[in-house]
Amino acid sequence: MPGILRLGKRFGPVRLEAACARASRVNARSYRHVKSILEKGLDRMPLDDGAAATATPVTHENVRGPNHYVN
């Protein structure tokens, strides 16, 4: 962990926090992954939190709606 914390001295604590959040989002929690995110500037890109919420629902005759599961 000290290696990852040392990245905060080089890139700053705000960027390190953002890089760790992005790495955690994709289950990439190693020093190498966090460092790569920082070096490529991916920590400055917004996380796509709303993609699933705004996706168009799937309509198909075999897909059951929420009312199917209500007792």
Image: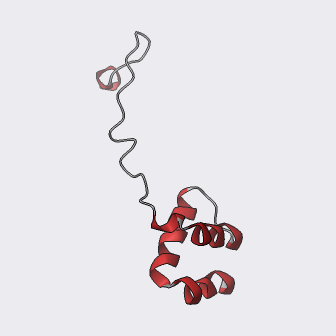
Q: Position of residue 52 (x, y in %)?
A: 39, 41
Residue extending furthest toward the top:
61
Rendered residue at 41%/13% (across/down): 60
Colouring: secondary structure
**In screen coordinates, is 20 left or right of 64?**
right
Q: Tell me where residue 6 sits by quadrant.
A: bottom right
Q: Is residue 11 above or below residue 64?
A: below
14 and 29: which one is in front?
14
Q: Position of residue 4 (x, y in %)?
A: 64, 80
In the image, 47 versus 28, the foreground residue is: 47
**Within the image, what quadrant is residue 46 found in?**
bottom left
Identify which residue is drawn at 39% across, 23% down: 58
- Above or below: residue 26 compared with residue 58: below
Residue 1 screen position, x and y as percent: 66, 82
Residue 29, placed above or below residue 49? below
Q: Is residue 27 left or right of residue 67?
A: right
Q: How many marks?
A: 0
Q: Residue at x 59, y 66 (%)?
A: 40
State left or right for residue 58 relative to residue 67.
Answer: right
Q: Residue furthest front?
A: 40
Q: Position of residue 32 (x, y in %)?
A: 71, 70
Q: Residue at x 40, y 9 (%)?
A: 61
* Quadrant position of the C terminus in the picture: top left
